[in-house]
Amino acid sequence: MANVPYVKIEPESDDVVRSSYERGLREVAFWAAHRADLAARFPDEFVAVTEDGELVAHSPDLLAFVELLKASGFGRENLYSNFLADKIRFVL
């Protein structure tokens, strides 16, 4: 297993790792609490919201969604985004 890259986390980066982890937990909790409502309102659409639930963009088309996000002025780090599938689909 020679040449296997790894990332050494320096002590000064602990806050960044912890912050990212905590944000991830908040996002998981947000989607657990709000997915059903948003999926009912925007089935089969990409949706972006702020941490406090303000709708920023939605579209069934990914490219249009990305353009809406760019125009919104919000950075990726300030939003929760997801595709809200109406049905579970499997692709093999």
Image (cartoon, rainbow, N blue to C red):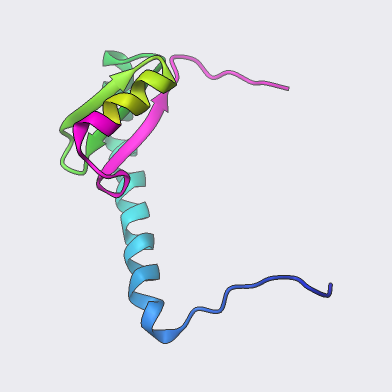
- Range drawn in magenta: 70-92
Q: Is residue 38 left or right of residue 55?
A: right
Residue 58 in percent (x, y) is at 29, 21
Q: Quadrant of residue 2?
A: bottom right
How many marks on residues? 0
Q: Is residue 30 above or below residue 10?
A: above
Whole-percent x, y for residue 46 in the image: 37, 23
Name the residue rendered at 36%, 14% in the picture.
43
Horizontally, residue 7 falls left or right of residue 24, namely right
Q: Residue furthest bottom?
A: 11
Query: Which residue is at the front of the view, 78 or 38?
Result: 78
**Quarter of the image containing the N terminus?**
bottom right
Q: Residue at x 43, y 14 (%)?
A: 86
Quadrant for residue 23, please give it: bottom left
User: Where in the figure is residue 29, as x and y percent of width and height?
Assistant: 31, 45
Image position of 67 with respect to 6: above or below: above
Seen at 42% across and 26% down, the residue is 83
Task: Report if residue 31 lies within the magenta region.
Answer: no
* Residue nearer the viewer, 31 or 55: 55
Residue displayed at 37% across by 53% down: 24
The spot of residue 22 in percent (x, y) is 32, 60
Quarter of the image with the C terminus in it: top right
Quick check: is 73 in the magenta stretch?
A: yes
| Closest to the observer, 48 or 27 | 48
